[in-house]
Image (cartoon, coloured by chain):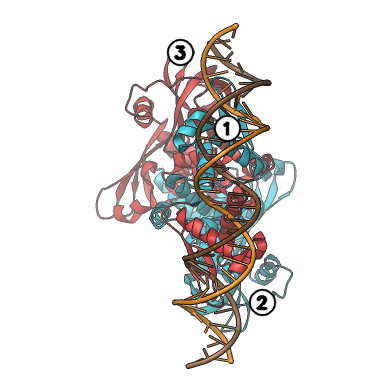
Chain colours: A cyan, B red, C brown, D orange
Amino acid sequence: MSETSSRLLELLSLLQGRRDWPGNELAARLDVSGRTIRRDMDRLRRLGYPVESLSGPAGGYRLRAGSAMPPLLLDDEEAIAIAVGLRTAARASVTGIEETAVRALVKLEQVLPAHLRRRVAALGAATYTLPVAGPTVDPQHLTVIAAACRDSECLRFGYRSRDGTDSRREVEPHSLVNHGRRWYLVAWDRGRDDWRTFRVDRLATPASTGARFVARSLPEKDAAAYVKRSIAGAPNRFEARVTLHVAAEEITSRVPAHWGTIEPLDAHTCEYRTGDDDLRWLALRVAMLGVDFDVHEPPELVEHLRTLASRLRRAAR
Amino acid sequence: MSETSSRLLELLSLLQGRRDWPGNELAARLDVSGRTIRRDMDRLRRLGYPVESLSGPAGGYRLRAGSAMPPLLLDDEEAIAIAVGLRTAARASVTGIEETAVRALVKLEQVLPAHLRRRVAALGAATYTLPVAGPTVDPQHLTVIAAACRDSECLRFGYRSRDGTDSRREVEPHSLVNHGRRWYLVAWDRGRDDWRTFRVDRLATPASTGARFVARSLPEKDAAAYVKRSIAGAPNRFEARVTLHVAAEEITSRVPAHWGTIEPLDAHTCEYRTGDDDLRWLALRVAMLGVDFDVHEPPELVEHLRTLASRLRRAAR
DNA sequence: GCGATCTAGGTCAGGATCTGTCCTCAACTC
DNA sequence: GAGTTGAGGACAGATCCTGACCTAGATCGC
């Protein structure tokens, strides 16, 4: 059996778990001679992993950061932490790495042992989501969809369209696109015989059918462009226009790009434009800025803020 | 040179990146014969990685989830996503995996190539933090401290104590403990010759001195217990007592454990108790529940809500 | 049902690799 | 300066790895 291969992996694992390892300790642990350990270090170095070494008492080996990622050897707890972390990153929608996070999550979930998968699911259920945060996407759905995209497998799911009608769909998934706080699936709809985009928060019980398909080419340069074009005609339910009583430069850094735009009006005020489907979320977003403001549009937001204000006033009696 | 070892690693990497791989494609890619690929699969199986295989046309090899974590082979983008995800997980303080997330992050950062480290730092800076979220912990500090704990290296940092006085400290770090939204460092203070706990959000520019120390034993069964005991005497600045106009069972699931306690009063109301150092955060936490409520204590919160209410009312004119 | 296509795995021979032992150097700490 | 630790050359014997060749079994499409 490949004795050396597994020893090299174990060596990498040990070197990742602690920083300094004296050679004889490694030798004892792996049950080989010190000479073999030295040769193994040589091998690791030739494979591109930068192993540092220090002579003398308190010397030993240490794995430095190199120019390429070595294979990560994780224990159970760490694997869970990474899975949970990626799930949060996937729905963070502020850092611009959401799609990569999903890709990494697919890779991890493919090999995640069943007992760990259960623990991740349990933790995911316990995750607290802001009650006002609007419709959220189940990371489980994201990984199912992303895996189907990667493996060119057909997908079946229930879908509730914008006007509220439900339908069952069978599609050939092309890609997952993140835009703002939303996720979109771009796919060839087998029932409609055409390309469609689906909002992931509107679909239910996605499952791979197991059937493979040959990838079609999108009628657009990439999926992100396609999504952009297809949602251009479907704006948010509410578009807010608000005057903030603060200098534009003071507030700009506190508003992430896709949460709206800031335009200076004069030295002390600026205009904030932002949109959303959910009034509560819209109200909170403005109120959280922590500055005085006036709402111009929409009337529903004015009404909602009035309700909120009276609730707070009542509470503070 | 260990030809087979590196081929096995590459094989694992390929199997993690795509689900199905026909044998001859792998053979062509790795420039070995098909027989060797079959032998490699055998090797991987013997090393504990469950490789599935399908016969017939459209057959091939596939890496299933097994009972142990295989080494994760990440590309640059994925490594970044994981680092960012772990940073968010480390300060999520709702899932109970914060400490493990930091441990995994230390492992990852130890081997993260410099150019990736820069990109992670840039993304971290772009991360949007709620303006009302109170003092936040720099994930960079957490990893520096956690690495020092792991490697038994002395740590130097500036510290601002509760009453606002600044000092320089040199300590022998013992462990990092997460509690609620806070992080605490338990360490032997070399200047004071005694055990201390430090709030991580209050310390500045932590850096390892490089000096090693021999671990002392804590005068308590574990670090978490020690932190619990030492913060027992230092409560939050504001302790809120609020009556919510909603049944206890309806709201309980929406309040994570360390965000306070819910006690039913009658069928339609319950009492919510929670504490914080920051009024704005306290106010938001209550307001976000989305139900009617009455504030009994503290008077500062009443005052703060009154201000907030009038700001919203003014905005909604 | 049949043929094509794929994996599974036995066998064999030649060559490459790996290991422990022994040895000499160099670097570092106390 | 003494003791400890890593670096690495040389060597012999054991082990392993590979490609070639072959047969068997599974699966799919026609």
Residue drawn at (41%, 53%) of the image: A116
Picture coordinates of residue C11, whole percent (x, y): 50, 65
| Separation (CA) of disc 2 from disc 3 | 70 Å
Picture coordinates of residue A176, whole percent (x, y): 60, 65
**Foreground residue among A224 and C8:** C8
Say whether disc 1 or disc 2 marks the residue closer to the N-terminus.
1
Residue drawn at (60%, 66%) of the image: B34
Q: Which residue is mark 3?
A: B192
Secondary structure of the residue carrying tag 2 is loop
Contact, mark 1 vs mark 2 (Cβ under 8 Å): no
Q: Which mark is residue A216?
A: 2
Please rate how many residues cluster around mark 3, counting C-alpha atoms within 10 Å: few if below 14, some from 14 to 19, many from 20: few
Up-down relation of residue A259 to residue A9 (above or below): below
Picture coordinates of residue B185, whole percent (x, y): 46, 28
* Residue type beneath disc 2: Arg
* Nearer mark to the viewer, of 1 and 2: 1
Up-down relation of residue B170 to residue A235 (above or below): above
Q: Which residue is mark 1?
A: A62
Picture coordinates of residue B36, whole percent (x, y): 58, 61
